[in-house]
Image: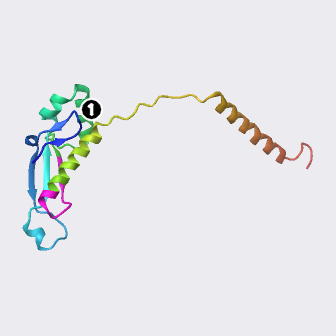
Amino acid sequence: MRDVVIDRRLVIPAAEIDTAFARSGGPGGQNVNKVASKVELRWIPGESAAVRSSLHEHDRSWLLARLQSRLTNAGELIVTSTLTRDQAKNREDALSKLATIIREAMIRPKTRRPTRPTRGARERRLQTKRHNSDRKQTRQRPFGQD
C-alpha cells in the first residue's frame, strides 16, 4: 500500500493505516459470497505522527475538531469502499476517499468582512422608493371625493 498524499504539507504514511477486507453485501451473485472485496481503512488522526509533525498546533486542533463527528469512540476514522468487485480498486477508492475527507476538513471558511453600501447605491434605493411611492399616490382617489 502507498502513502496517502493530502497536500504539500501532509502525507499519511501507509504504516499508520490499518486495512481490513470483508465480504461485500448487496447484489452480485455467487461472487459476493466467496470474495472479500470490501475494503475498510482505519486511521487514528489524534495519534498520527504525520499530523503531529507536519501541522501546526492550531491546524491540528482544527482538523481534529472537524473530523470529530466522523471518529469512533476510540478516535479512529473509518473509511469503507464497496464500489467495485475488485479488491485493489476498492482499496484505491478508499484511499482517495480518505484523502478527500481530510482535505475538505482542512479547508477553513473565509471570514466575512462586513461592507457598507456605496453612496450611489443608497441614492438609487431611495430614488426607487420615491418613485414607487409617487406611483402609488397617483392610484388613490383625491381627498374628499367618494
* The magenta stretch spans residue 88: yes
Can you name the residue that lies furthest to the right here?
145
In which quadrant of the rendered view does residue 26 lie? Answer: bottom left
Can you name the residue that lies furthest to the bottom here?
29
Tell me if 96 is positioned left or right of 109 in this view.
Answer: left
Label 1: how many residues lie within 10 Å, few (<14), some (14-19) or many (20+)?
some
The residue lying at 82 percent from left, 43 percent from top is: 137
In which quadrant of the rendered view does residue 121 lie? Answer: top right
For mark 1, give the secondary structure.
helix
Q: Position of residue 141 (x, y in %)?
A: 87, 47
Tell me if 137 is positioned left or right of 31 in this view.
Answer: right
| Span highlighted in magenta in the image | 78-89
The residue lying at 65 percent from left, 27 percent from top is: 119
The residue lying at 13 percent from left, 46 percent from top is: 42
Can you name the residue that lies furthest to the front here?
8
Q: Position of residue 44 (x, y in %)?
A: 14, 39
Q: Is residue 90 above or below residue 31?
A: above
Tell me if 6 is positioned left or right of 43 in this view.
Answer: right
The residue lying at 92 percent from left, 47 percent from top is: 145
Q: Position of residue 131 (x, y in %)?
A: 76, 40
* Colour theme: rainbow
Q: Which residue is mark 1?
A: 62
* The magenta stretch spans residue 50: no
**What amino acid type is highlighted by mark number 1?**
Trp
Q: Is residue 9 above or below residue 72?
A: above
Q: Position of residue 127 (x, y in %)?
A: 73, 35
Q: Is residue 38 above or below residue 6?
A: below
Q: Is residue 20 above or below residue 44?
A: below
Tell me if 70 is positioned left or right of 36 in this view.
Answer: right
